[in-house]
Image (cartoon, helix red, strand yellow):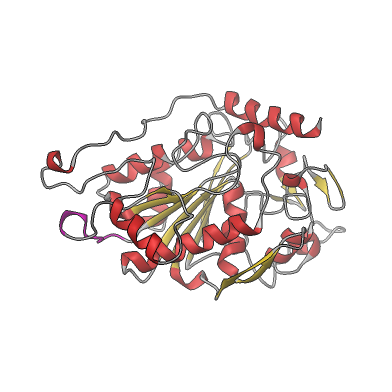
Amino acid sequence: MKRLVLAVLIMGALVFNGCAKSGEPDSTVSADDSKGVCYDPGVNAFGSNFQSYLNSTGNSDLTGFGGSTSKTGDCAIVKQPVVFIHGNGDNASGSAMPMGGWVTSRNYFKTKGYKPSELYAVNYGKPGAMNASLNYHEASNISKIYRFIVAVKNYSGMAKVDVIAHSLGVTSVRAAVKGGTYKEYTGTSVYLGASINGIIDTFVGISGANRGLNSCGSWPLNMWTPTCGPTGLSINNPFLVAINGGKASMSYSYWTWSYVPNTLSMKVGSYTYSIMSYADELGCMPVMPTYCYVYARHTSYLDGQNGGKVYYSYPYGHMGNKEQTPAVQYNMVVSHNTNG
């Protein structure tokens, strides 16, 4: 029953944000028709050259989009690659749910001169709104995100990459960049490798539940679904305590409601930005903006961030925060500001 309720909430979010995408997945064009323009394989598969690289490095299990038929000539990687990480129940191409994926952002970045060989996204978790209550920070998912970021960086030959994440992808990236051994509540663990915080230039976290979700409750008195469980988004669960610097209660004072910076902040990469909304019907609740707060701060705020963009009304809901802000995402990555 609880699983069904959470799924209905997700579907409600999609209706609440029900404005159309600004673009559909790119159609496949033959290499012969490219006329000097880097061949674009679209959003449903990796480019053949990047796929070959993944296969050769033990990452053939990864799926998503990015790359082309080469990384030379018209496909030469000049700009710092951007890696997109989707949210709960979503996928890279957007086929899993309405307003999903990264088509809108990818199309915008392309209008600004980015090539298919400079824009990447990876799939993880179970796609579809009905699976939303089943996804959590699973070891295999954290491994996929870690390996993908490293693969894009190494394949591109660049010193760093930029990462833009949405929803569950925000906390997943934050766990992945720490590296080391990641262990989930089931006992399953995976060794990721060294921390990759140093290879990320700009991190943009959109609608992340960095302090947990009030709708999940507090650990261990939380809603019993994987998404709200000990390796999910229940407040003060073992996962969130670990990625937030080993601090329960987020270092806020219960008595004065004053904020004390965490000894280990939520900052990722050299520049960290957040995009949040008080109309976020999943991170908050409709018409209940105070429900956004966990320990006196919006759950999507990232401690130590360099800046952020805040919205207060429709269409900037949970999905709208991603779909309506490509220009903001671009400026955060390229100019390190929050304009847009």
In percent of width and height, residue 9 lies at: 69, 30
Residue at point 51%, 41% (across, down): 91
Residue 279 quadrant: top right
Would residue 269 be found to the left or right of residue 317 on screen?
left
Determine the residue located farthest toward the left in the rendered image: 35
Which of 152 and 55 lies nearest the eye of the viewer? 55
Residue at point 29%, 49% (across, down): 116
Would residue 255 be found to the left or right of residue 261 on screen?
right
Tell me the quadrant of the picture where the C terminus can be found.
Answer: top left
Q: Which residues are magenta?
A: 73-79
Assess whether residue 78 is covered by the magenta stretch: yes
Tell me: residue 150, above or below residue 138.
below
Image mark count: 0
Which of 91 and 270 lies nearest the eye of the viewer? 91
Assess whether residue 155 is covered by the magenta stretch: no
Residue at point 70%, 27% (across, down): 8
Tell me: residue 165, above or below residue 248.
above
Tell me the quadrant of the picture where the N terminus can be found.
Answer: top right
